[in-house]
Amino acid sequence: MAWICATRSRVVVVATVVGGVVGASVDEVEETRCVVGGAVAGDVPDEVHPPVATATATRPSVMRYRILVQPYAGGCSRLKGPLKQGFPAPVASCQPQADHPAAVATDRVGRTDVRRTIIVVTTLLLAVSVYPASFGFWMRSEVVDADAFTTSALESFGLPGSYDAIGEIVADKVVEEYPVLRFVRSNLASLLGSVLATDPFEPALAVVAEDVHDRLFSGVQTAVIIDLAEYEDVILESLEDSAPGLIPLLPGGVFRQYTLFDAGEIPDFSANTDRIRAGTLFAAASMVAAIILLVVKVRPWTTSAIAIGMALVIASLVTLVVKPLASGTLQVTITDEAYRVLAVNFFEVTSRSLMAQAGVIGFGGAALISIGLAGLLGHKRRNAPA
């Protein structure tokens, strides 16, 4: 009869039976349990540690078995053999043990995988939510809001090329009504650009900006006009100083209202205002939910801080990348040079607040990452062996 031994950890047991005499060698035995004919040797009861394997010699011969005890989930083990062909393999007896080291390690690995998945998915969700939430907030506060739109428009007129572009547009409208002036169009455009840059014309330009905003977001699709009748004296005074020879060429009634944008020429985004508001609220709610999930479910707190900081930095970088792309899109899609200059300059002014907002978000994210890394290093330093 053969004695076969095994331990809880990974071991190799070689049992040799020669004429009923048993010899065995065991490598790295931690807790050896031996079986003799189904009974456990030693003072450990059989019901506590059931037999691992049994084998019986039927004739005086040499049998060699190699028993590999490999841990599996749930604390079970599997026996493999034999080394030589023609001999039966040992019988394996497996009983799940919740406290088995292999079971504990497997469970720990499973929890780590789930935790890592939660962190990655939630961080991406947070980054995806922060960008539309910040962009929607910027749209509502800087573009959809009428007062902010008008203020930004007047500020954009001060950028290089804006007044010249307005002068070109007005000059084209005047020449359409009075073709005789086509020979002096360039002089007229330059004159109008200079006059429009003066303070007396600021109220007229403010009215134009308000009308453009109404056409964009109120659903009103009427023409946008500029009234030169109120500024006849200002224009004539400027002509006397810069181009006095142009005054006799001006036909009567030239100082009147001119249409800058025909009805329906400005796109109507009024139907999108409610969508912008709803999208902003949804993105903000998703952002808050992702932050709460990271704070509550992820431990230690340093990991949560780093994950939230990374999401904020990603959203900030996306804004920095999208801004020049949007400006390039305006330059490509608007074919008329004068209108393109005005649109690009307006976007340049309004996007300043968007860039400032992205900078605050990115700085906050970097601060959270720094705090998380500092806490993580401090934790490792405290737990380091003396």
Image: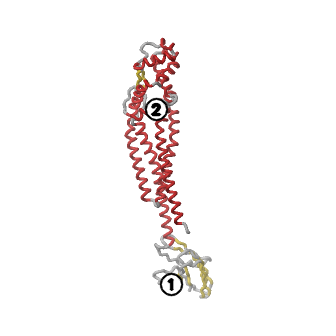
Residue 132 in which image quadrant: top left
Helix, strand or loop status at disc 2: helix
* Residue positioned most to the bottom: 20
Amino acid type, label 2: Glu
Please say if 349 is above or below 32. above
Is residue 360 in sight in this rendering?
Answer: yes
Please say if 325 is above or below 66. above
* Residue positioned most to the top: 248
Please say if 385 is above or below 175. below
Please say if 185 is above or below 222. above
Q: Quadrant of the C terminus?
A: bottom right
Camera-nearest residue between 372 and 59: 372
Residue 84 in which image quadrant: bottom right
Is residue 340 in sight in this rendering?
Answer: no
Q: Residue at x 47, y 29 (%)?
A: 157
Q: Quadrant of the N terminus?
A: bottom right
Amino acid type, label 1: Val
Few, some or many residues within 10 Å of mark 1 (<14, 14–19, 20+): many
Question: Is residue 87 left or right of 114 when viewed as pictured?
Answer: right
Few, some or many residues within 10 Å of mark 2 (<14, 14–19, 20+): some
Residue beneath disc 2: 155
Residue 51 spot, x, y in % from top left: 50, 81
Q: How many marks on residues?
A: 2
Q: Residue at x 47, y 74 (%)?
A: 97
Q: Residue at x 37, y 33 (%)?
A: 218
Circle number at residue 40:
1
Camera-nearest residue between 41 and 325: 325
How far, Cα to Cα, is label 1 from label 2?
A: 92 Å
Helix, strand or loop status at disc 1: strand
Camera-nearest residue between 55 and 374: 374
Residue 216 spot, x, y in % from top left: 40, 32
